[in-house]
Amino acid sequence: MRELLKSDDDYALRKLIYAYPDETEDGLKLYEIVSSCGEAGGCDAEEDIDRVMTQVKYVDFELPDRLNGQLLQDVGVAPPGPKMGGEIIKGVRPMLASGGELKSIDEAVEYIHKNY
């Protein structure tokens, strides 16, 4: 977390928010930020919390849900199984949620065809 907050990569931060939405809302990740800043010294916990909370509104929690096993079967990507759910879907949904690498289902399907 500390390294992520030191970087300027807002898309990576959005992926983390997507992966832990309940923890972000409940403040558990924010507590981790405060704790890690206290240990590290030299970071501004209030600034980091503000950055996380600012990025929450940019995380798309709905678009990634459209990427599912049925869609992947329909476009001929992979048969049902561990690769489809465990590798492809879990790997690509955060990219859609962050709005960085992939901005649409079509881009996600193209990415999947090229990389899987």
Image (spheres, helix red, strand yellow):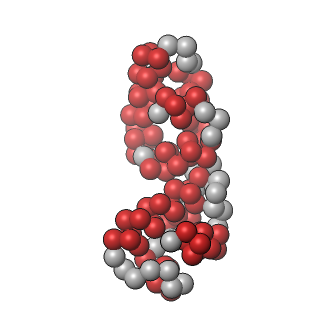
Q: Is residue 5 left or right of residue 73?
A: right
Looking at this view, name the residue that lies furthest to the front: 115
Residue at 38% across, 71% down: 83
Q: Report the number of numbered marks.
A: 0
Residue at 50% across, 71% down: 116
Q: In the rendering, at what x and y percent does residue 100 appear?
A: 65, 53
Is residue 56 in sight in this rendering? no
Residue 110, placed above or below residue 44: below
Residue 2, placed above or below residue 82: above
Residue at 61% across, 46% down: 11
Q: In the rendering, at what x and y percent does residue 52 appear?
A: 56, 36
Q: In the rendering, at what x and y percent does residue 69 appear?
A: 43, 77
Q: Is residue 113 left or right of residue 39?
A: right
Question: In which quadrant of the rendered view does residue 86 lie?
Answer: bottom left
Is residue 102 in sight in this rendering? yes
Q: In the rendering, at what x and y percent does residue 46 appear?
A: 56, 21
Question: In which quadrant of the rendered view does residue 96 lie?
Answer: bottom right
Looking at this view, name the residue that lies furthest to the top: 41
Residue at 49% across, 50% down: 18
Residue 79, placed above or below residue 91: below
